[in-house]
Image (spheres, rainbow, N blue to C red):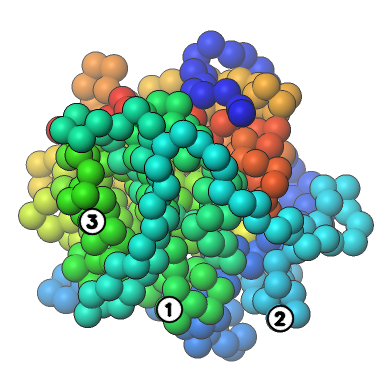
Amino acid sequence: MQQHPIDPKTVRGAGPGNDESRRRTRRLRYSWPAVVCVVGALTGALAPATAGAVTWPTIPGVPLPSIPAVPLPPGAKPWWSYLLPGGTATTTPPGGGAPTPPPAPTTPGSLAGKAFSGTYTTTAGSLTYTGYVPSTYKAGTATPLVVSLHGCTETADVFRQLTRWDQLAEAKGFIVVFPEQSKSNNNMNCWNFFQQAHMERDKGEPSLIAGITQWVQQHYTVDPKRIYVDGLSAGGAMSSVMAATYPDLYAAAGIGSGCEYAATAACAGYKSADPAQAAQQAYQAMGQHARRMPVILFEGDQDTTVPPVNAQQIVQQWQLTDDMADDGVKNGSIPVQPTSVTHGTSAGGQAYTVTSYSDGGPGDELLQSWLVSGMGHAWSGGCSCEQYADPAGPDETGAMYTFFMAHPMP
């Protein structure tokens, strides 16, 4: 089992870098991962004629200026052209060569705690879920809860194995639950984060994920100040949605290779729409529960499925949303400049950079952004037993846990 957690201040190393020729080469070599996060847009009836066009979601009663289409970069293929026959995702070796099918899921680990599963159903639909309660759990003792959202083509059990959240839950004494998207909602198991029907409180998928969270609260002694949400790719983008729509439920959010709130499908293969407009919409989505939302995010500097520019936009969006959420106006109350930039090297020899941003108070970290050198679309430090893992990278699961525990609900 890999190390938990990581303190970026204790390590040193070189930061990542790239140039246009390297990006062009890697774009061609690693075009296969584009199935993750974006393939859900296919089920939304997008067609090649709309390549790069953005349909900006709106919230009733909130006027927003028109947003121009976000074009694909010159010469880039539409991202749906990266899909393999039959929609089957495969893994291409880093050095090139013939792709191979992802490994089959292994059986659940024999940890000392208790696994649980079920189906949550409301008028909004139905989702299954699996979860894990550590062996140290005692009814009546408040226990943290992590809600973890898989990416496209994945299941809850695959994501459990990829992230090892259940192993860390046993080691640290918290509960973790993995909601699973239904193929009836999206035939590639993507969360529909880009559709207006699934971007609002008490509606669609957000209401079902929140409902599963609340079910765990009802059946176990959960610390209401320490409930967190995280995810990968489409799950990371949906984590943004959950942070915006249920800021009274989730104390902080973790976004792995994902997109900002109201990202639209443009974040796949290129970048999200204007983060300033997304910030306004996220603030409106918070409604009467608006508050500053702590966020940790991970991104690979060689990700061509959700390119690194999206990480920058996530930071910008949440800084502006938090600026409005703390006092109701956009007045620069949240500093935009980083408070620290540290470089490190993982145990696997992979360089990374951690950039931290404050909420304006002394030593109060609000946002933490990890950029992993050489990583594509993957969970950093993830188990090699599953697809979309970069085992040599810094421990994303451990870093998110450390950030979460430092940010209880105010």
Q: Mark 2 or 3 closer to N-term?
A: 2
Nearer to us of marks 2 and 3 is 3
Left or right? Give the position of 335 relative to 401. left
Quarter of the picture containing the C terminus is top left
Quarter of the picture containing the N terminus is top right
The kind of secondary structure element at disc 1 is loop
Please determine whether, in this image, residue 393 is positioned above or below residue 305: above
Amino acid carrying label 1: it is Asn
Q: Which residue is mark 1?
A: 185
Q: Residues within 10 Å of mark 1 (few under 14, many from 20)?
A: some
Q: Residues within 10 Å of mark 2 (few under 14, many from 20)?
A: few
Q: Which residue is mark 3?
A: 215
Please determine whether, in this image, residue 373 is positioned above or below residue 102: above
Residue 86, x across and y down, in percent = 71, 81
Amino acid carrying label 3: it is Trp
The kind of secondary structure element at disc 2 is helix
Amino acid carrying label 2: it is Gly
Q: Which residue is mark 2?
A: 86
Rendered image quadrant of residue 269: bottom right
